[in-house]
Image (tube, helix red, strand yellow):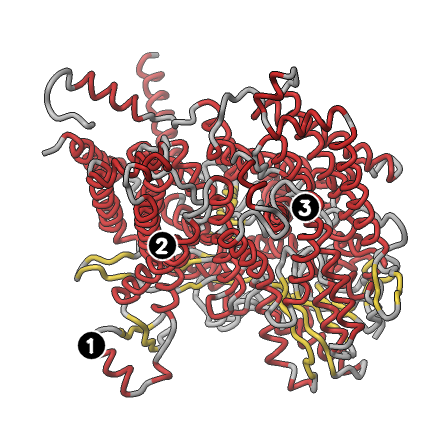
Amino acid sequence: MNSDLFFQYVVAGITYGTIYAVVAIGFNIIYNATGIINFAQGEFVMLGGMIAVTLSRFLPLPVAILGAVAVTTIIGAVIDILFIRWLRGPSVLRMIIITIGVSILVREVALHVWGESVRALPYFTGTSVTSIKMGNVYISPQVLWVVGVSAIAVVALSAFFHYTMLGRQMRACAANRDAARLCGISAKNMVTLSFMLSAGIGAIGGAVVCPITYVQYDSGTPLAIKGFTVAILGGLGNSAAAVGAGMILGILESFSIWVLPAAYKEVISISLLLLILFIRPSGIFGSAEAARLKEF
Amino acid sequence: MRGRHLPVLIFGGLIVGIQLATSVAGNPYHLTQLTMSAYYSLLAIGLCLLVGYAGQISLGHAGFFAIGGYITALLTTHDLSSRAGGASRWLAKAGILSSRTDLYGGELLTVHPWVACLVAVLATVGIAYAVGGPVLKLRGHYLAMATLGFGVIIYRIVLGTEFLGAADGISDVPPFAVLPGLEVSGKAALRASNYYLAWGVVIAAMVLLLNLIDSRAGRALSSIHGAEDAAEAMGIPTARYKLSTFVLSAAFAGLAGVLLTHYNGGIGPSEASVMKSVRYVAIVAVGGMANLWGTLLMSLLLNYLSLRGYFGTYDDAVFGVILILIMLFAPDGLLRRQLFEELKAAVFPAGGEKET
Amino acid sequence: MRGKSGLICAILALALMAGASVQAAEPIKVGAILSVTGPASFLGAPEAKTLEMLVEEQNKKGGFLGRKIELIVKDSGASAEKAFSFAKQLIEEEKVFAILGPSTSGESMKIKSVAEEGKTLLLSCAAAEVIVNPVAMYVFKTPQSDKDAVIKIFQQMKKMKISRIGVLSSNTGFGNAGKAQIEKLAPAYGILILANEVYDKAASDLTAEVTKIKAANVEAILNWSIEPAQAIAIKNARQIGLKVPIFQSHGFGNIKYVEAAGPAAEGVIFPAGRLLIVDVLPKSHPQKAVLNKYKKDYESRFKEEVSTFGGHAYDAFMILAKAIENTNSTDKELIRSAIEQLQGFVGTGGIFYFSPSDHNGLNIDAFEMLTVRKGKFVPLAK
């Protein structure tokens, strides 16, 4: 394999990796605030893409995307209010099953609203065949959009959690819910906010990868599985690590087709997930102590 | 006769009653879907033991079903006649291989269904044992994701491998002659006997599980579910109990896979999908997590309706809604154990054998 | 008066009873097992819509032989066990006269023996060769054979002096079957396969796969899949600077994939039924009238572009209708041999010539080589 091919594979890996990382970031937000893994995260990404496509029929593209993000954010809030908010001390098992049920419901509603056909957004810059040539390596401008948007998302999130009042309240809630409530922070509102943020991030991700990957009513579930893998790889709750872990998984998958038939790509990523779970559940970048502090 | 076995008799009566009713009404066709439901219920009650009683979630049980089904399908359809040599002749004489003619008149030499069944169930048990060890050390979300991951790996393997039929699965699986004169097959003429065979297997499994729950092992399981660390502190070898339960439920799933594959005459990758695993968990949840009878009845009903296409294009949506509604409003399931106990108290007011 | 009204009542009662038992009043039940939702919904949904439309139209004309047609559609979601259960239900319980579908090869294989045992006609909308080979008495299929599609492509490649190709296929029944035919027939046409990749049907990006193909220095790419990934494959190939000709399977026959792929679809070459280019067919072409009518009816009713997938269901129903018309009965044996004797039946997939040993009826002439120009399907210049 010469160096051009090597770098082309790396670029492919970065493409996959950023898509997974976007989903993983969404998982982490809700997990940090609530200790819940939201199995419906992949559906937020799907909704972002689908709604953006529908809105782009009669709105200019940037407005359509903002609209899609707004609508999905509201849907995130609605899901929390309808299904999560009023539960008292639910067990982990119960929460897992509820979010799985929600994911199925959202998917089936999408099927009956939009039909089964596949939809695509136009490329933000250029077309489906333009690519930027760096040396002998070709990279689609859309990939740069995806990477750029994810980077901005991570930075913005970080800033939100560290420098804003609301963000600090959410962190307080995650660290110690009862103490936070004693300080007057409404835990329930923090949870709703986390769902909204998570849905919004997912929607942005969905809209920005839609030109590359297309969107269909059932694109959410496989993404959720990959996203969760990446989240655990990086250490649940750590969004910056999720990006790194996403890159690692993406590149691993990309190079794996050199040795294994491509149909087994997912076997590689799941095997990696199981390996991490067995050996080091706190993730590659996580620490065991930090993991133990989180209630699960 | 212990009190807990009375429901078994009642249920057995119900099964016989349904069959007689359908034959009187002249539509024995329902028995087909009821028979298929029986095999899915075999998996469900095993899963109920694991999820409800031992409190370990498994989102990958369809994987065990698929392992059992695919192994038996592969062994009973792979033609070995081209490798005719001393070994295969000896094996044929020993009864391990059997020959038959296929739909188009060709000669086939394949593994005997009984041997295939044994291999399939043993393989399922072996894999469950190997996977269960590390997986069950995890808890909560991690356990859920690990089992989900296991299910996905099995799905990808059967979907991506050519000699397992890839996306088309394996067809033309022969009937399984369990006893001379009694075979597991989808033929219309054998509808009633297959129905009784299937439910017979399920009832036997139920009796096994009921005995298990009322034994010391069962109480250990309940304590693990309630508070694992406390149980460990009390000296209960939790890891061993969890693993045994996992392996037992996997064995049920594998056996169900074997029998249903022979009944359907084939198997496809859809049997290993994530959605199937989720459905099984939904059925256990709806039946009442730690309620074998509830799970059995719900499995019978829901699988029957689904297989008859009652829910139309909303099939998956129905299971999703059921999951949500049950988990929100009745996390102990619709047919709660307390309900049964209250009923029992009403029927047998005082004295007599009571379930603990 | 009493006696007379009593007599009239008696006659009416007798007539009612007779009417109830007279076959003519009973509807003809036709079953359909389709993957309307689920992983093969892009096949099953247009098929279901097509059948719905055709049955309604036929019923307006009085149905078959004066009896209304009752279409029972079962959504199998591409799941083999559901297909099996529905097949048993339709054949044994509903006692349907024929089953149209299933949409996928896997399901068709599962119920092939059920249909044979139940002596019920099965007109499959799935493409695999094994459905009709070996021939089962009651089982037919309407899509073209993938062997012919591959031959057509190889003939075109020979014309373009292409001999070294890279092959991509998806891990579905359609993809696997195509790959098998490609590998089998390549040597006969002097085609060397330098790279051979199988990808997951739900793959969202195939850059790594096409990179591997680019590294093999091929003269053309042949992609064989039937779902959205086929648009992704050609897009990724162009993005990494692969300029060689791209060939697709007949699964590319839906304008949505062209739209999704955008400029990457320009110049893609693939074989397809003539439904997609009906507008440029000469008036004298035998298929023109049938294709035009189907396209117009489908598009005006469902407000979406017609696809070759729905066409398979159209052919299945119309073949059944023709056989009923020819024999003037609904006896399964008569219909079965009537279908086997159909020669020159004009359908959307091609012109069918059935025989007792050929239960598919289409040959290589069912295909036309098409390409994409400015986002539209046009015939490939000879």
Q: Determine contact: label 1, label 3, CB under 8 Å.
A: no
Q: Chain of mark 3?
A: A
* Image quadrant in which the C terminus of chain B is located: top left
Up/down of A253 relative to A110, above or below: below
Q: Residue at x 89, y 61 (%)?
A: A132
Q: Chain of mark 2?
A: B
User: The residue under label 3 is which amino acid type?
Assistant: Gln
Residue located beneath label 3 in the image: A216
> For mark 1, does the 10 Å Cα neighbourhood hold few (<14), some (14 to 19), or many (20 or more) residues?
few
Instruction: Determine whether the residue tagged by mark 1 lies in a helix, strand or loop.
Output: loop
Q: Residue at x 63, y 76 (%)?
A: C182
User: The residue under label 2 is which amino acid type?
Assistant: Gly
Q: Is residue B279 left or right of residue C225?
A: left
Residue located beneath label 2 in the image: B257
Residue located beneath label 1 in the image: B94
Marks 1 and 3, how far apart in space? 54 Å
Q: Quadrant of residue C322?
A: bottom right
Up/down of C279 relative to A65, above or below: below
Q: Are marks 2 and 3 on the same chain?
A: no
Q: Is residue A234 left or right of residue B171?
A: right
Q: Is residue B297 left or right of residue A77?
A: left
User: The residue under label 1 is which amino acid type?
Assistant: Ala
